[in-house]
C-alpha cells in the first residue's frame, strides 16, 4: 500500500490543525483508539465535510505516527487528480485490497456510513444518524476482524446552516461521481466560499463494539446483521445525544 506523504499529507495536517484551534476541538475518551491493534472507526458525518473526523485523524497521527485510512467518497477515484490526493493521504474508496496491508500493520480505518446523504441535509435535520440499511462497514469489519469504535460529538452540525438536501439534489441533476449539490450558509457567506461558524467541536469516542466478531456471526444472516447495525447506529446516536446533553426525546439536559 502506498504510504501517505507528500503535499497532500502536509496540506491536510496544516489545514486541520488550524481548524482544530478555530473550533477549540477536543476529544473525550481517546484511549480506546490508542490501544494496540487495528480498529474500524465508525462515525457520524457532520455537515458538510465531517471536519470533526478530519481533525480526529490529525490528533491520532500525532499520537500514533500515521493518518488513519479513510474510506473516502467515490469521487476520489473518478475525478482526475483526486486519486493522487487519496494516495497521498493513505485513503481508499472502497474495500480496497490495500486495506489488508494497513490492518496487518495494526492501523485504524475510518468511515462514515451516512456519507453525503447524512452530511448534506438541511437545517431541519441535525444530529440524527441516517444510515438506512447501509451495512457495508459491518461486512468490512467482519472481513478484517476489526472491532468497531463508534464516534459522535457536538458542534459538527452547527458550523454551517444547511439550506437544502444536497444528496437528493445532486442525484436529481446528475452530478458527476454522485457528488451532492448542497447549499449552506457559514460565517462569511455561502459554502464553499465561506468560513464555518467558529463553534466549539467536541468528539466523543465510545468503547469498541464486538458483537460482529462473536463465533458464528454470519453476514448472510439478515437478522444478525440488522441487530449489529442497530447497535452501532444506536451507540453513535447515543454519543451525539450525550455530547449535546440531549435525552432520547430531544430535550436538552445537563451532561453528567
Image (cartoon, rainbow, N blue to C red):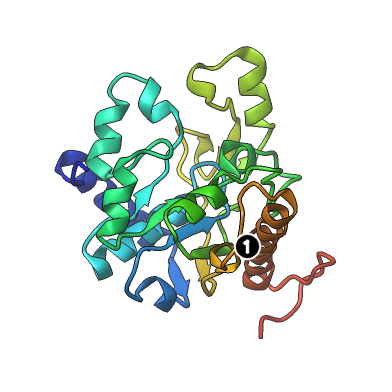
Q: Residue furthest right?
A: 249
Nearer to us in this view, 223 or 85 = 223
Quarter assignment of residue 186: top right
In what element is the residue under mark 1? helix
Residue at left offset 67%, top offset 81%: 255
Residue at left offset 43%, top offset 27%: 75
Q: Residue furthest top?
A: 173
Residue 17 sits above or below residue 235 on the image: above
Residue 202 sits above or below residue 186 on the image: below
Nearer to us in this view, 94 or 68 = 94
Quarter assignment of residue 6: top left
Spot occupied by residue 21 in the image (x, y as percentages of width and height): 36, 62
Spot occupied by residue 198 in the image (x, y as percentages of width and height): 49, 56
Does the rendering let one see residue 45? no
Q: Residue furthest left?
A: 6
Quadrant where the N terminus is found in the figure: top left
Quadrant where the C terminus is found in the figure: bottom right
Spot occupied by residue 157 in the image (x, y as percentages of width and height): 60, 52
Quarter assignment of residue 249: bottom right
Residue 120 sits above or below residue 196 on the image: above
Q: Is residue 100 left or right of residue 40?
A: left
Residue at left offset 28%, top offset 53%: 102
Q: How many marks?
A: 1
Label 1, residues with CA under 10 Å away: few <14, some 14-19, many ≥20: many
**Label 1, on which residue?**
236
Nearer to us in this view, 61 or 51 = 61
Q: Is residue 6 left or right of residue 26?
A: left
Amino acid at each position: 500500500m502506498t504510504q501517505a506523504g507528500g503535499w497532500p499529507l502536509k496540506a491536510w495536517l496544516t489545514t486541520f490543525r488550524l481548524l482544530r484551534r478555530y473550533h477549540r476541538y477536543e476529544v473525550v475518551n481517546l484511549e480506546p483508539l490508542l490501544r494496540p491493534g487495528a480498529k474500524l472507526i465508525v462515525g457520524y458525518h457532520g455537515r458538510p465535510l465531517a471536519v470533526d473526523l478530519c481533525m480526529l485523524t490529525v490528533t491520532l497521527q500525532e499520537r500514533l505516527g500515521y493518518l488513519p485510512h479513510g474510506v473516502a467518497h467515490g469521487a476520489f477515484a473518478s475525478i482526475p487528480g483526486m486519486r493522487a490526493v487519496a494516495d497521498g493521504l493513505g485513503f481508499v474508496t472502497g474495500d480496497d485490497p490495500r486495506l489488508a496491508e494497513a490492518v496487518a500493520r495494526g492501523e485504524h480505518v475510518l468511515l462514515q456510513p451516512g456519507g453525503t446523504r447524512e452530511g448534506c441535509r438541511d437545517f431541519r435535520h441535525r444530529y440524527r444518524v441516517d444510515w438506512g440499511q447501509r451495512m457495508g462497514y459491518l461486512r468490512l469489519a467482519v472481513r478484517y476482524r476489526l472491532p468497531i469504535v463508534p464516534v459522535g460529538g457536538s458542534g459538527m452540525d452547527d458550523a454551517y446552516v444547511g439550506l437544502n438536501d444536497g444528496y437528493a439534489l445532486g442525484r436529481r441533476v446528475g452530478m458527476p461521481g454522485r457528488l451532492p449539490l448542497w447549499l449552506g450558509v457559514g460565517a462569511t457567506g455561502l459554502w464553499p466560499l465561506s468560513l464555518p461558524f467558529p463553534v466549539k467541536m467536541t468528539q466523543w469516542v465510545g468503547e469498541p463494539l464486538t458483537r460482529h466478531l462473536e463465533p458464528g456471526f454470519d453476514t448472510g444472516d439478515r437478522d444478525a446483521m440488522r441487530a449489529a447495525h442497530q447497535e452501532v447506529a444506536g451507540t453513535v446516536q447515543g454519543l451525539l445525544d450525550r455530547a449535546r446533553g440531549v435525552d432520547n426525546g430531544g430535550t436538552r439536559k445537563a451532561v453528567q
